[in-house]
Amino acid sequence: MSQQQPITLIGGGLVGALLGVLLARCGRTVEIFEKRPDPRPTGAEEGRSINLALAERGLHALRLAGLGDAALRLAVMMRGRMVHPREGAPNLQRYGTDDGEVIWSMSRAALNGLLLDAAEAAGVRIHFGQTLTGADFDGRRIRMTDAQGTGRQLDSGVLIGADGAGSALRAAMDARTPLGIRVEPLNHGYKELEIPPVAGGGHGRFALEPHALHIWPRGGYMCIALPNAEGSFTVTLFLPAQGAYPSFAGLPDAASARAFFLDAFPDLLPLMPRFAQDYARHPVGALATLYLERWHLGGRAVLVGDAAHAIVPFHGQGMNCGFEDAVLLAALLDEAGDDTAGAFAEFQRRRKSDADAIAAMALENYVEMRDSVADPRYLARRELGARLAERAPEHFMARYRMVSFTRLPYAYALERGRAQDALLQRLLGDGLDAGAVDLAAAEATLKATLPPIRHG
């Protein structure tokens, strides 16, 4: 191991810090350069967090780093989606079959702090307030600039870019050899608000049921709320950025936004006493999907996580996908010795189709969350799917379960999920009543149509 090249990681966020831990535990010498100040004293940038949803893929990675239990102590369990319709009582749509299949809401800042502590404990050297402003890939030199604008040239090891959707290393790589960058804006934005903890009530310090991801679907737009460990909820409003009302362009101030909420989310507004302040102060975030044809420059540099394949947040898989990247890349580098070019090529070969698949599923899940969760046809398919999964679990598993509660490849989950949806639609025909379907005949059709779920 001592003969292997050192690693220079650009980006000390979630993926970079975890990758630093995994590489250091493989015996690598690792340095991390992060453009932000150390987030542990200051916490997350206000209005920009979008709570994390930790699922099995990410939890597996944390377990490998020895951090699974510590991470769960920072998290709140979410059993499913609590759907708040315009009319009628909220209803829980479970993610899995029982409390063994849940996802976990957690603070980005808290998890990042845990990972940075673990990286330092593993021997990783972390430099904060350092922005990459240039890279000489042949000479293995980088230029870093501090918060005061002072630049310096440094020798670099093998470069890994974990510096997010706005990656500076990706820009430097693309300037050297075009990476085939394509960005598809969603044309919808988001703004964060907050439901603070409350005293007493049926949910203790939580104003709503704490063990759920709350959704107010309104067709074309929505609000969601994720619980935080201290009793608050992070609320995120997703709206078109421009165009006809409602859009962020059409809600320029807190007064217009309050009027909109009174109409669209009347049960949610009273839970946010600081609505006006939060709406005025928090920025509108942009949403887009990033695609690259190439993730690496031979054995000199490679991109991971959002730097290679940023996705929209509607499947809660951005972090989980990035953590899967980190686990695979660390393992490939450990196996490859000094053949970093081979490791990087294999990393892209094995992950590109999965990254494209989860990007597609995240976009589809936005439509499902804002529109379908209240649609009778969707609910009928969901109910029939649940009945088939109970009768023939080796042949049917909801796509959400494959994505969130297994480590089946994303590409397989996408393909299998589409085949299952087509079968459910065929079985239901024009009907909306899953109870009217002959389950024995449906099970026989399922087994004749689709092979068993692939495991391993």
Image (cartoon, rainbow, N blue to C red):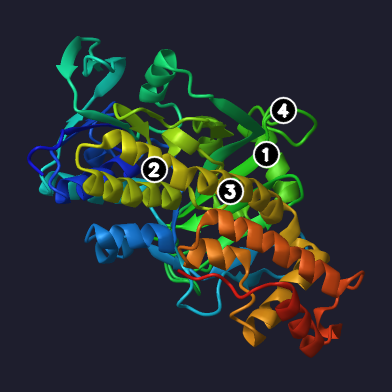
- Please tell me whether residue 324 is drawn above or below residue 32 in the rendered image: below
Residue 285 occupies which quadrant of the picture?
top right
Q: Using the image, determine if residue 33 lies above or below residue 117.
A: above
Where, quadrant-wise, is the C terminus in this rendering? bottom left
Q: Which disc is residue 346 wearing? A: 2
Badge 1 amino acid:
Leu
| First-in-chain label (3 vs 1) | 1
- Element at label 3: helix
In this rendering, the answer to whether 422 lies above or below 124 is: below
Please tell me which of labels 1 and 2 falls first in the chain: 1
Q: Which mark is residue 242?
A: 4
What residue appears at the point 42 percent right and 13 percent down from the top-left corner?
175
- 258 to the left or right of 423: left
Q: Percent from the top left, x then y, of residue 144? A: 23, 17
CA–CA distance in space, label 1 to label 2: 39 Å
The reply to whether discs 4 and 1 touch (Cβ–Cβ < 8 Å) is: no
The answer to whether mark 1 and mark 2 are in CB contact below 8 A is no
Say which of 209 and 205 sits in front: 209
Q: Which residue is mark 3?
A: 357
- 3D distance between C-alphas at marks 4 and 1: 9 Å
Specify the amino acid type for callout 4.
Answer: Gln
Image quadrant containing the N terminus: top left
Q: Which residue is mark 1?
A: 239
Q: Is residue 434 visible?
A: yes
Marks 2 and 4, Cα distance to the nearest angstrom?
A: 41 Å
